[in-house]
Image (cartoon, rainbow, N blue to C red):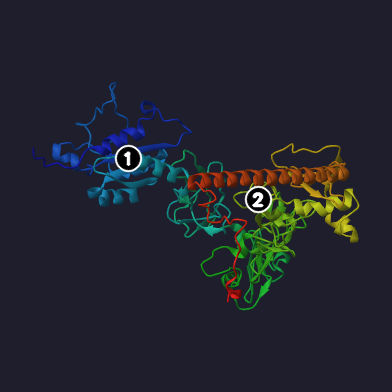
Amino acid sequence: MTTFDNPEGGFDALMQAIVCKDRIGWRDQARRLIVFATDATSHMAGNGRIGGIIEPNDGQCHLDDGGMYSEALGQDYPSLGQISRLVKDHSINVIFAVTKDVVSVYKEFTAKIPGSSLATLDRDSQNIVNLIRDRYQQITSSVVMKDTAGSGIKLRYYTSCTGSTLQENNMCDGLKVGATVTFTVSVEITECPADAGDRKPTFQIYPVGVNEALTVDLEMLCACPCETPGNPGFVPNAGECNYSGDLQCGICSCRDGHSGQHCECSGDEDIGQLESRCKMDNSSHVLCSDRGTCFCGLCECQSRSNPSEIISGEFCECDNFSCDRINNKICSGNGECNCGQCACYAEWTGKACDCQTTNQACIPIGGGDVCSGNGLCDCGTCQCFPNAVGRYCEDCPTCPSRCAEFEPCVKCRVFNDGPYLDGRCDTRCAYSIIVEDTVEVEQTSERDCSYENEERCQVKFVYGFGNRGERKVRVQREPVCAEPVPMMAIGIGLLVAMLLAGLALLALWRLSTYFYDKREYARFVNESNAANWNRETNPLYVTPTQTFKNPLYEN
């Protein structure tokens, strides 16, 4: 199917959504939001002629009982001007969520419709929820001031938004729920209408998208009788003007060579030149930071109700009360506020002087190592190692025992002994040491310790830490000593044991020789029987009658 009419009638629907307050259900104080989602451009006033419709849109509600637009064939499409005016009159926020190929068209529409915004919609519209959420957050976190003042009236808006420097601006972004923003508006008459009936205009100042407005009835005094001599409102050479000008309608008109609000300034410079000296830079429109009065090119700063709060500086840009506070104390009470910046006292640092430069705050109550040796001190707070916990990182089940640290104090405080008797006991052992009849580990944070005294008895104690990190030691009153060794009994026992051992060895030796001799005799008998020796066959036998001859004596 081919179509020759790509634009749609979305502006008809937009018009009805705006003006049909009762049918739609708009609440008076509600923030009103319309999402206009499309992938095509929209028909506007004049396009109805294509269908033969020439009656202009009347900007009224024409929804029938079924919620359908009844004037689709009777009235032309609404114009962009009508949409813009009605959006403003009904405080409507419009989000144009359109596809990429028509963004440029709706960008032009957004520029003409107040309170509208533009978002690019994916072709499959999957991002529609995110677009609505993001644009809604943007709308609700910003305030834009508009007005209906006509020609000849110039309005300027000044605000400091969320505490920033006062600037000329009619919009604040990044606001949170409950935030208060103050706008200061100056009204300037740039020209006086020739028709006297136009000199009392009425206009409104309103936040875009919010159904509230301030109505201003202005009366322009283009020519006043009090400006002419002889009128009661005209005082020549008035004292209010330092006798250097005439008071006209309550305003000083200074003679040549004088200027200022009360003609207090002398010289050839006009009031504009003098006021420029009271501005911090050429881009500023605020005199004396809006916290003082400009006199002859010099700022005279305002006084505060609290005499200790002082505004100072060449342009009244400084004070001693706007620095960061901790616990409602300026600079945490550890410094002085100097032109919005904290000048910290010695041993303190940080934006609010809330950080100590020393490690004193990280030392446990009663003394000890910084963060108990189990962490690092950062801004007066212990940053514990992974295996330690506690305000001073004192509880560390996996750390090496600290028994050796407490042992000298146990000796000097409980048993009047040890190396700290040289005068260090009171200073090094200021923490709690309690003597008990018996001591046992009662908490997971406690550690069991003991040492051997000169009498070779075991002194038992446990150490732990309180809720505030203070050290606590509990010592057993009496050392544990072993029973004395019976030396006499041990000596006699050893002697008897040695005698018994000797007798046992002698008996073993005697038995071994007996069995050896017996074995040798048996072997001899066996060998003799085997050889069947007698007197004739025994080579070792010599008869008693035989004479042994010595070869040396033969011959």
Which quarter shows the C terminus?
Answer: bottom right
Outermost residue toward the bottom in this view: 268
Viewer-closest of 52 and 236 = 52
Q: Mark 1 falls on what kind of element?
A: helix
* Residue 408 x, y percent position in the rendering: 83, 54
Q: Where residue 109 sits in the image (x, y, percent)?
A: 30, 48
Total residue callouts: 2
Depth check, front residue: 66 or 523: 523
> Disc 2 residue type?
Cys
Residue 228 appearing in the image? no
* Residue underneath mark 1: 128
Q: Which of marks 2 and 1 is nearer the N terminus?
A: 1
Q: Which amino acid does label 1 sit on?
A: Ile
Q: Is residue 316 left or right of residue 206?
A: right
Against 294, is 489 above or below? above
Where on the picture, by quarter, is residue 543? bottom right
> Which residue is found at the position 63% from the left and 73% from the top?
255
Q: Mark 2 points at which residue?
A: 399
Toward the left, the furthest residue is 1
Whether residue 378 is situated above or below residue 507 in the rendered picture: below
Vertical side of 185 occupied by 136: above or below? above
Quarter assignment of residue 380: bottom right
Q: Indicate the position of residue 495 as horizontal and vertical percent values.
A: 82, 46
